[in-house]
Amino acid sequence: MAFTLPPLPYAHDALEPHIDTLTMQIHHGKHHQAYVDNLNKAIAGTEHESKTLAQLVAHAGAISIPVRNNGGGHWNHTFFWESLGSPASGGTGVVPTGKLADAITAAFGSFDEFKTKFAAGGAGRFGSGWVWLIVNEGKLAISSTPNQDNPLMDVAEEKGTPLLGVDVWEHAYYLKYQNKRPDYLAAIWNVINWSKVAERFEAA
Ligand code: MN
């Protein structure tokens, strides 16, 4: 069964001014669509055609480079869109509460320290990749992956269940922030959907 591009869970301009409309249109409509199309091409007519995206991602390194890159790309972007929200839907001014807030404080000292370490993880990723908040056996950690890898993959250096992932490829921010990746990573806090992150933490 072929994979399809999921619709954005909000309008293209919903994350303005922090993430601009044109970036969202190109990022979702062109980049994410290309990962979906190339994943479908990579598995067409193979034994992997009937597998779920989760199965493909879990064994991505063992399957093939195209499945690793494009299966990862499809999974990561779907996860990313769901991790974000407009200020009205829970972005600006909203911070984690409850068990998630307690776990963040326990792991990183405070919410502000968590944000600093997460941004450093994203800024420190050389080239293209992702920065993640993951949970492994109840413990939170920040990790980063190259290209379209993620912490669920067999090839991940640090494995865990992703709770939050932020795309640090230039295509995610270049139109508005140019070479200033740290500015993008500072602005992203305005549009994180913390209720979604908390829901993932409860389920993990
Ligand atoms: Mn991207």
Image (cartoon, helix red, strand yellow):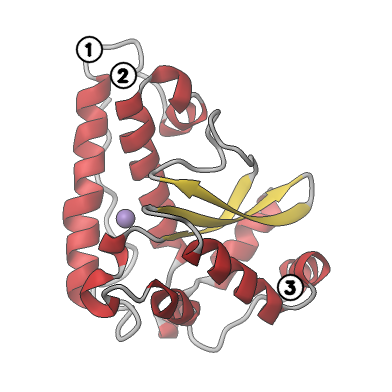
- Expressed as whole percent of the image width and height from the top left, the position of residue 91 reads 48, 80
- Residue at (41% x, 48% y) in the render: 76
Q: Quadrant of ligand 1?
A: bottom left
- Residue type beneath disc 1: Gly
Which residue, given by chain and number where applicable, does mark 1 sit on?
45
| Residue with the mark numbered 2 | 49
Q: Is mark 3 within 8 Å of ligand 1?
A: no
Q: What residue did someone put label 3 on?
A: 101
Q: From mark 1 to mark 2, how far is it between C-alphas? A: 7 Å
On the question of residue 34 being in view, the answer is yes
Amino acid beneath label 3 = Ala
Q: Does the residue labelled 2 lie within 8 Å of ligand 1?
A: no
Q: Distance between the residues labelled 2 and 3?
A: 40 Å
Residue at mark 1 to residue at mark 3: CA–CA distance: 46 Å
The reply to whether the C-beta atoms of the residues labelled 1 and 2 are less than 8 Å apart is yes
Q: Which of 117 and 194 is in front in this view?
A: 117
Q: Are marks 1 and 3 in contact (CB under 8 Å)?
A: no
Which amino acid, mark 2? Glu
Q: Nearer the viewer, residue 167 or 54?
A: 167
Disc 3 packing (10 Å; few <14; some 14–19; many ≥20): some
